[in-house]
Image: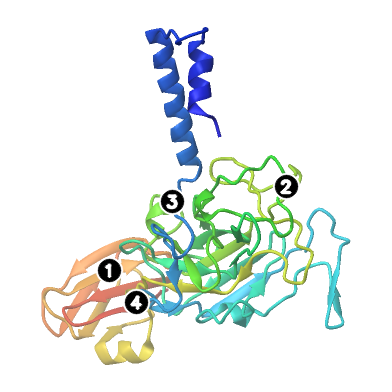
Amino acid sequence: MINPTSLFNALAGTRKGPARLKVKNVKRILLIILVVSIGSKLFGQFAPAAGENGSTAIHKDDALFTGWAKTCKVQRGYINVSDTTVVFTQNNFTSNKAFFGTEAMATGKPGGALDCISLGDGGTAILTFDFPLRNGAGADFAVFENGMKMQESPFQYFLELAFVEVSTDGKRFVRFPAVSNTPASEQMASFGQIKPEHIHNFAGKYVANYGTPFDLEDIKDSTGINTDSINFVRLVDVVGNINPDYARYDSKGQVINDPFPTEFWSGGFDLDAVGVIHFNKLTCISSQEIQKEFKVWPNPVRHNDQLNITGNIFKSTKIELCTLTGKRLKTWVSDADSQTKVNLPELKPGLYLLLIHSEESAETIKLLVE
């Protein structure tokens, strides 16, 4: 920490007796003090730990959550990516990759610090949900890890981090712009400590039972995804090694430093759960509800043919034709009650979605074009 008085004297110059300052020197001093002050604040500019004023952490029991991940598919990483000969043995099983936990442990509501699955260095997890996620007001989902506050100096946090990515079609993933201001001049040890204020948009920012929120608004301008129809969330362990051969970088090109190596069966990011705040239930396909509310025929249909729609239809009913990725191709508004007809545009053979919004109902129907 720079002492402002020492800085002042050094720049202004001192003589025996009272210091004689020039206006130019005073301006220089004030400018440098201002820059130092702003720089130190920016370095720790992000939300603090769970329970502190200004924290964005969301407890697992918060009423904001409307659902949880339904499936999880994990690809494990090594327990030491810089030396893949390193192995760990537990319960008579030996591996050079992480092997703690099961995929089922990452589905549903968080179950505690040991109810998780470890990804290993650079490991990945892809999760799916009952309904697509959408871009609502504020955070749209949150990721839970099993970080903890350390009971030794400097009394910060043991956190293992992961990038967060989302996709509409399961092929094109977009990563949230994450920032790590944790110093990377020296490798953080296996049980090193991180200040939550130094990291942003990384899963694992908060301790167990508190989710790190993610807002789809941050990536609304990305290509290849529909932020109102997110079907997949992917987590990618950041590794944490500052060696250029293995380092990972944040959205600003800075090396990410987190605990390394973690040569245990539980090495790497430990995924506990993904909680959903904003579902897009309009894109849910439920055959029972469709038969009860609307009927569409013919289906399959030929391109350029006419579709008949009956059911809970009103003159204000909105009908939208979309691709499976959520791109809207055509919109109609019904001009009759109980039944309406629409003329399809020129379409390539394949599967499409027909979104029907009436005053009382909203459904999505799969439409096969031959």
Spatial CA distance of label 1 from label 2 is 54 Å
Crowd tier of the residue under label 3, counting other residues whose Cα lies within 10 Å: few below 14, some 14–19, many 20 or above: few
Q: Which residue is mark 3?
A: 222
Between circles 1 and 2, the one closer to the viewer is: 2
What element does badge 3 sit on?
Answer: loop
Spatial CA distance of label 1 from label 4 is 15 Å
Crowd tier of the residue under label 1, counting other residues whose Cα lies within 10 Å: few below 14, some 14–19, many 20 or above: some
Spatial CA distance of label 1 from label 3 is 23 Å
Q: Residue at x 58, y 40 (%)?
A: 253
Vertical comparison of 183 with 304: above or below? above
Vertical comparison of 126 with 314: above or below? above
Q: Is residue 265 or residue 367 the one in the foreground? A: 265
Crowd tier of the residue under label 2, counting other residues whose Cα lies within 10 Å: few below 14, some 14–19, many 20 or above: some
75 to the left or right of 327: right
Q: Which residue is mark 4?
A: 281
Specify the quadrant of the image occupied by residue 299: bottom left
Q: Residue at x 63, y 69 (%)?
A: 270
Q: Quadrant of the C terminus?
A: bottom left
Question: Mark 4 or mark 2, which has the lower sequence index?
Answer: 2
Contact (Cβ within 8 Å) of mark 4 with mark 2:
no
Kindly identify the amino acid type of the residue bearing the numbered disc 2: Gln
Spatial CA distance of label 3 from label 2 is 33 Å
What element does badge 2 sit on?
Answer: loop
Q: Which residue is mark 1?
A: 320
x and y, in percent, of residue 364 in the image? 33, 77
Contact (Cβ within 8 Å) of mark 1 with mark 3:
no
Question: Mark 3 or mark 2, which has the lower sequence index?
Answer: 2
Crowd tier of the residue under label 4, counting other residues whose Cα lies within 10 Å: few below 14, some 14–19, many 20 or above: some
Q: Residue at x 73, y 54 (%)?
A: 189
Spatial CA distance of label 4 from label 2 is 45 Å
